[in-house]
Amino acid sequence: MVYVRPDQGSYTIDRSLMNRRYVLQYILFFILGGIGLCPFKADAVPMKDDPNGFEGIPWGAAFSESPEFALVEDGRRVKGYELKQGPPAWGPAPLDSMRFVTIDGQFGRVTIRYHGSDAHQQIVRFLESKHGALDRTPGQIAGKFVKQGNWRGEETEISLTYDNRTDRGIIFVESRSIATKFADGMAPEPDNLGATY
């Protein structure tokens, strides 16, 4: 606050009010600056048709080796299976691999790997046609090097990540309820003395 002193013709500033004003300005600057500088995580698109499984296999189904499936990952709780004839067609793009993952005997995730920008574009169009369009607002699905998309239904979540630097993409299609077990199931097992490997 500024005061005029008529007897001396000069100004006197109330320092306590000025200090409070500067403090408030700095707080406002940091809040607004933080909002402007922090990257926002893209929200998931609500899935329009939740399959409650993958290609007709319901979440929670039991898996075992069979004429169609080979066991390729054999952990204590987590097991992975792949089709013996190789990854099937899933949409228009060729895939590098497709792994069906169980935890505690329950089918809960499919991991799909692919490569190439053409394959990426085809897969995104395929997923959008089945589950809904991604938010095309700048910064929501594409960064400088990594492109992401996420669809979330009541039972199923699909997460897609494509890295321009390596020209590789990965998709997780998983049960929302069973997926919470994977973090615990993939943790290293302690040995008898409590150490982990």
Image (cartoon, rainbow, N blue to C red):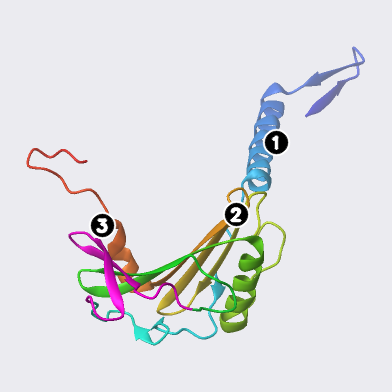
Q: Which mark is residue 155?
A: none
Q: Nearer the viewer, mark 2 or mark 3?
A: 2
| Amino acid type, callout 1 | Gln
Q: Nearer the viewer, mark 3 or mark 1?
A: 3
| Amino acid type, callout 2 | Asp
**Could you say where residue 28 lies in the image, as x and y percent from the top left?**
67, 41
Position of 51 relative to 195 (above/below):
below
Q: Please, what secondary structure does the residue beneath circle 2 have? A: loop
Is 188 left or right of 17, judged from the image as shown? left
The part of the image, by quadrant, that contains residue 1 is top right
Residue on which disc 2 sits: 167
Q: Which mark is residue 184?
A: 3
Q: Please check the rendered image and state whether residue 56 is part of the magenta-colored stretch, yes or no.
A: no
Residue 125 or 178: which is nearer the viewer?
125
Reading the chain from its start, which is encountered first: label 2 or label 3?
2
* Mark 2 vs mark 3, CA separation in Å: 30 Å
Q: Nearer the viewer, mark 1 or mark 2?
A: 2
**Could you say where residue 101 lies in the image, as x and y percent from the top left?**
32, 69
**Could you say where residue 37 lies in the image, as x and y percent from the top left?**
66, 44
Is 6 left or right of 22, judged from the image as shown? right
- In this orientation, does residue 43 appear? no
Q: Please, what secondary structure does the residue beneath circle 1 have? A: helix
**Could you say where residue 45 lies in the image, as x and y percent from the top left?**
57, 73
Residue at 42% x, 84% y: name it.
55
Is 173 left or right of 100, judged from the image as shown? right
> Magenta segment, which residues?
64-88
